[in-house]
Image (cartoon, rainbow, N blue to C red):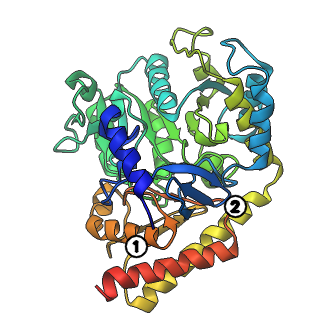
Amino acid sequence: MQTTNSHTLFNQAKQYIPGGVNSPVRAFRAVGGNPLFIKSAKGAYLYDEDGNSYIELINSWGPMVLGHAHELIENAVKEAVSSSLSFGAPTRKEVEMAELIVSMVPSVEKVRMVNSGTEACMSAIRLARGYTGREKIIKFEGCYHGHGDSFLIAAGSGAITMGVPDSPGVTKGVANDTLTAPYNDLEAVQTLIEANPKNIAAIIIEPVAGNMGLVLPKNGFLEVLRDLCTQHGILLIFDEVMTGFRLAKGGVQERFDIMPDLTTLGKIIGGGMPVGAYGGKKEIMDFVSPAGPVYQAGTLSGNPIAMSAGLAMLRHLNTQPEVYSQLESIGGKLVAGFKENLKKLGLNYTINHIGSMFSIFFTDQEVYDFETAKSSDTVLFGKYFQAMLKRGVYLAPSQYESLFLSTALTDEHIEKIVHANYESLEEILVKA
């Protein structure tokens, strides 16, 4: 496996781009070595600048449900480009996209387009504060809602301790308005609510977490969160940037039948193009300018190219429900293969799985929050990542990221991935 071109490009990039990458996880620091520079992708494969191909299990962190360069998305983009890249004015496609999202996502009655998942989450929080007249929010350790100041907050030392900035540049004032609880810990949430009566605007959560590795909500956790929010006049925000249209047509809220007040979306609604959205109940969304007093704007919001790609994707998902049964089957086969490998090798590691998302944690503990996720052996994960890469399988370069599957994966691909998993585990653990 040659990496000459990627190595050269990375050294060149470091001269002009901080750390040589435009998003930190791409730097491979968590797994060792230098990042591969990708030249193209098609179906289930990535192709790097060094002439190597990889079966990949990231799918641009979620949106490529149908695999890379799917002809439906490609054709929609090609057709849209001929009419110009941007207008900064309303288009028919924005209306069609809004109607489609409202028809597919159970809790959404109105929706506003933005340009990223980060922007969607930032806007939803501002709207929640404006609508409720309250200032504080509750978020959960290990959940990632983008790099907005309100979300880059580490937990305090106790259940009612204010959070502290988790990044230079985030002010203590912002941190004071962000309260942090462990994922799946209802007692901590109740304590925070009681300690801040009538001052919490929203609870924001990844209803299925994908940013500490895949972590599932415990039975009843989301239901009680919903009840607590209703009881205390708090808006419940589901961050479905990763899970929306992936775990079901209507996301986690459809799959678990739990309705948030606001939902943030991204990734898939652009078919891979930069896009995001937030939506919810009419009376809440009508607080957004120009209908209401909460200001939010964006020149490229509802960009016609992104809308075209997203419409092609969502219309396909909406009319072809067999996509979801196919994704369930692919995920089930892969995870069953991985678990059988662990059994054969006498290993006791944890695999979390739902639908087309899964994670392997190098720990024998049940993983249900960020603390238990951190019990995973990240050094061992780095060795596993490199061993899989050597065998032509491209994973997320971090223990704390979910894997995402696509319908482009065939039984032959699954067999190759499972075989690579066995050989990689054997190499780093049995023969080491």
Residue 268 screen position, x and y as percent: 63, 43
Q: Residue at x 37, y 39 (%)?
A: 13
Disc 1 secondary structure class:
helix
Label of residue 407 in the image:
2
Residue 418 screen position, x and y as percent: 54, 78
Tell me the quarter of the image containing the C terminus.
Answer: bottom left
Q: Is residue 190 visible?
A: no
Q: Nearer the viewer, residue 248 or 56?
A: 56
Disc 2 secondary structure class:
loop
Q: Nearer the viewer, residue 190 or 332?
A: 332
* Badge 2 amino acid: Thr
Q: Quadrant of residue 99?
A: top right
Q: Is residue 169 left or right of residue 79?
A: left
Q: Which residue is mark 1?
A: 387
* Badge 1 amino acid: Ala
Q: Is residue 103 above or below residue 281?
A: below
Alpha carbon separation for disc pair 2 and 1? 25 Å
Q: Is residue 335 left or right of residue 152?
A: right
Q: Is residue 349 visible?
A: yes
